[in-house]
Image: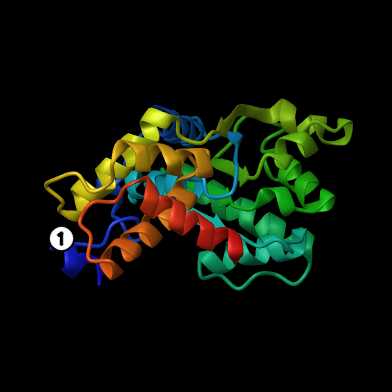
Amino acid sequence: MIRSYFGWERTPFTREIETRHLHRSQRFEECVARMKYMVMTRSIGCVTGEIGCGKSTAIRCLKDGLDANKYRFIYLSDANLQPRDFYRELLHNFGLPPKYLRSEAKRQFQHLVWDLYENQQKVVVVVIDEAHLLSGDMLQEVRFLTNFQIDSVSPLALLLIGQPELQATLQLRIFRPITQRMNIRFHLEGLSLQETRNYIEHQLEVAGSTHPVFTTEAMDAIYAHTRGISREINNICTAALLEAVLRKDKLIDAVHVSRVLTEFKEQ
């Protein structure tokens, strides 16, 4: 509906956008760069950010940029993940039937990682999303997982991705051995006002728009409501575009945005 009404090649503000078309704010570029550094140095690190700020997009960007001949990427996202299930999931990703006992499954995975690293020159990259929901036992297991050859060398990279409370959890004394192993900790913030304007304009340009669609006042109103959180920007912009289609308007101003925000508040 939106694409055909405005005569665009694709619909903007959707999650299906290819990584090559992503809007790359300075903070987003820094986030991806830090994640790449964790991978290159085969270290453990932590990335936090508010819901919808672009963490998952950064993970996707990282994955698409890795050479499949050099890295084996594994993505896990399970709030109820426990140590035994953790190793089972990792081994299933390699198509291997895991041993029954957790200790055996752990050794099985470690041997696999070492074989890839030493004999195939390939690094395993494990990304655990929603890590703020992990239990204390699971976080402790992360510490033991990274202890290869008496902590002298690591054949894998491990990235913990979660909401801001993950940082607070890791500050607890009991988890200090984990934070001491972390080479990188990064917090992804929302976009600034100017970055929000650039983000909206970039999305429209990628969609195929050749002229302004949102007024500056409309974009500023969107920023004031979303605080620069990209997922919320997408939601408001999509609703405003639908509003414009229904009213047969081609330009979205602050009045359109105000109507949309009123509807959001009533839901």
What residue did someone put label 1 on? 8
| Quarter of the figure with the N terminus | bottom left
Is the image coloured rainbow, by chain, by secondary structure, or in one colour? rainbow
Q: Is mark 1 on a helix, strand or loop?
A: loop
Asked which quadrant contains residue 146, the reply is top right
* Foreground of the two, 14 or 227: 227
- Relative placement, left or right, of 176 versus 251 is right
* Residue ID at (38%, 50%): 255
Q: Pinpoint residue 86: horizontal percent, then vertical percent.
A: 69, 60
Q: Can residue 219 be seen in this view?
A: yes
* Foreground of the two, 97 or 161: 161
- Relative placement, left or right, of 114 versus 255 is right
Q: Pinpoint residue 245: horizontal percent, then vertical percent.
A: 26, 66
Q: Is residue 67 visible?
A: no
Determine whether 196 is above or below 141 in the image: above
Number of numbered discs visible in the structure rendering:
1
* Residue ID at (76%, 46%): 139
